[in-house]
Image (spheres, rainbow, N blue to C red):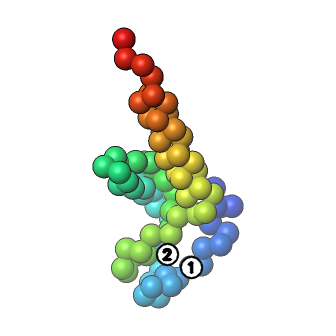
């Protein structure tokens, strides 16, 4: 896991004060009846309450992936049927 991604993360959870530990998580977003998923994402997870902190560059990449998928679907929908 790249340490640069966690430069902004602190050692304690802002929600409960528990200790944060690096883990891999899945990002999921349900939008317009479609599930967008990014697996094995590096994140900091609170050992006490389970709060998850995902670095901003990864969140931006996830949002970019969702937008790309939406544009691709839109182009497919506009194709004339044979």
Q: Residue at x 43, y 87 (%)?
A: 16
Residue 21 appears in view = no
Q: Furthest residue to the bottom? A: 17
| Tag 1 secondary structure | loop
| Tag 2 secondary structure | strand
The N terminus lies in quadrant? bottom right
On screen, residue 13 versus residue 48, left or right, reads right
On screen, residue 75 versus residue 10, left or right, reads left
Above or below 69: residue 39? below
Q: CA distance from mark 1 to mark 2?
A: 5 Å
Above or below 16: residue 37? above
Q: Nearer the viewer, residue 81 or 70?
A: 81
Instruction: Identify the image quadrant of residue 7.
Output: bottom right
Residue 33, how many percent across, how many down? 30, 49
Above or below 79: residue 70? below
Above or below 13: residue 62? above
Instruction: Identify the image quadrant of residue 46.
Output: bottom left
Q: Residue at x 49, y 53 (%)?
A: 41
Instruction: Identify the image quadrant of residue 49.
Output: bottom left
Residue 59, how many percent across, how many down? 55, 58
What residue sits right under mark 2 in the picture? 20
Q: Residue at x 49, y 82 (%)?
A: 13
Q: Are marks 1 and 2 in contact (CB under 8 Å)?
A: yes
Residue 82, how many percent across, how many down? 36, 11
Q: Residue at x 59, y 78 (%)?
A: 10
């Amino acid at each position: 896991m790249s340490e640069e991604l966690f430069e902004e993360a602190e050692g304690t959870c802002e929600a409960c004060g528990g200790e944060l530990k690096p883990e891999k998580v899945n990002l999921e977003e349900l939008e317009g009846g479609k599930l967008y998923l990014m697996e094995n994402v590096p994140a900091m997870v609170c050992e006490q309450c389970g709060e998850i902190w995902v670095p901003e560059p990864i969140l931006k990449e996830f949002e970019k992936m969702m937008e790309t998928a939406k544009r691709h679907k839109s182009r497919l929908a506009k194709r004339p049927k044979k």
